[in-house]
Image (cartoon, rainbow, N blue to C red):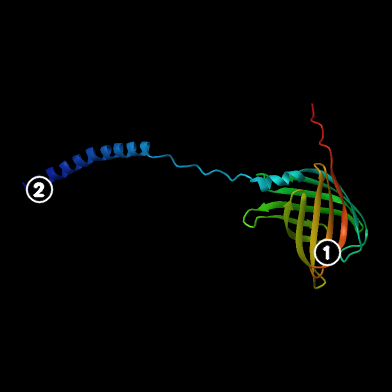
Amino acid sequence: MRNSRLAILAASGLLIAAIAVPAQEKKAGAEKKTAAPEKKMEAPKPGPEVKRLAYFVGTWKMDGDIKQNPMMPAGKMTSTDKCEWFPGGFQVVIHSTGKSPMGASHGLGIMAYNAEDKAYSYYGIDNMGFAEGSKGSVDGKNWVFTSDSKMGGKTYHGRYSMTEDSPTSYSFKYEMSEDGKTWAVVMEGKSSKAAAAPAKM
């Protein structure tokens, strides 16, 4: 008799549980429907400082005059610089090909804006072993990038200044200094943006 009572109690418990589970699931389902939807994370968007780099996008023809300096002999330098947005629209990638007093030149550069430092940056490499980074700022139409590099055990300070003469041309000069006070012009010149190719019909 005791065993039969236990069996009845167990069966009753199973029955109550079987009825309660769907009711709880139904209630949980209703709560899920009324819960506020989760916000979807959006990809970051370029700010106005990044968009300022749009000035450089395009193909530029550069003509420069190199003065005697520790890096290379004096002479003329020319290059074609193809500048385009990197996917995402945060950096401008520059592919350069040209000629210098030391022969053919090939370079790769990246321009960007660092919101944490509130500064522009440029990092470039070339086929002659050059690899250097610099920080920059812009004031109106005037850009200035500064860097430090070592050659022959000495530290040299570099300063690249550029002025937007028009939407399709800019003039520039590159200076070097050993003490950061007295500067010597190493190169100066002008770049002009090539006209965009006509759309194919």
**Left of 108 or right of it: where is 70?**
right
In this picture, is 109 found above or below 25? below
Q: How many marks?
A: 2
**Left of 2 or right of it: where is 55?**
right
Mark 2 Cα within 10 Å, few/some/many (few <14, many 20+)?
few
Q: Quadrant of the C terminus?
A: top right
Secondary structure at numbered mark 2: helix
- Image position, residue 194 (x, y; %): 84, 40
Secondary structure at numbered mark 1: strand
- Image position, residue 160 (x, y; %): 80, 57
* Residue under the image location 55 percent in, 43 percent down: 42
In this picture, is 182 found above or below 56? below
State which tag comes first along the sequence, 1 or 2.
Answer: 2
**Left of 10 or right of it: where is 127?**
right
Kind of residue indicated by mark 2: Asn
Which residue is most to the right? 75
* Residue under the image location 82 percent in, 32 percent down: 198
Q: Residue 122 or 118: which is nearer the viewer?
A: 118
**Disc 1 to disc 2, how far (Cα)?**
100 Å
Return the residue at label 2: 3
- Image position, residue 75 (x, y; %): 94, 57
Which residue is most to the top? 201
In this picture, is 123 found above or below 59? below
Q: Foreground mark, 1 or 2?
A: 1
Q: Residue 98 or 14: which is nearer the viewer?
A: 98
In this picture, is 12 found above or below 199? below
Kind of residue indicated by mark 1: Met
Mark 1 Cα within 10 Å, few/some/many (few <14, many 20+)?
many
Q: Which mark is residue 176?
A: 1
* Residue under the image location 69 percent in, 44 percent down: 51
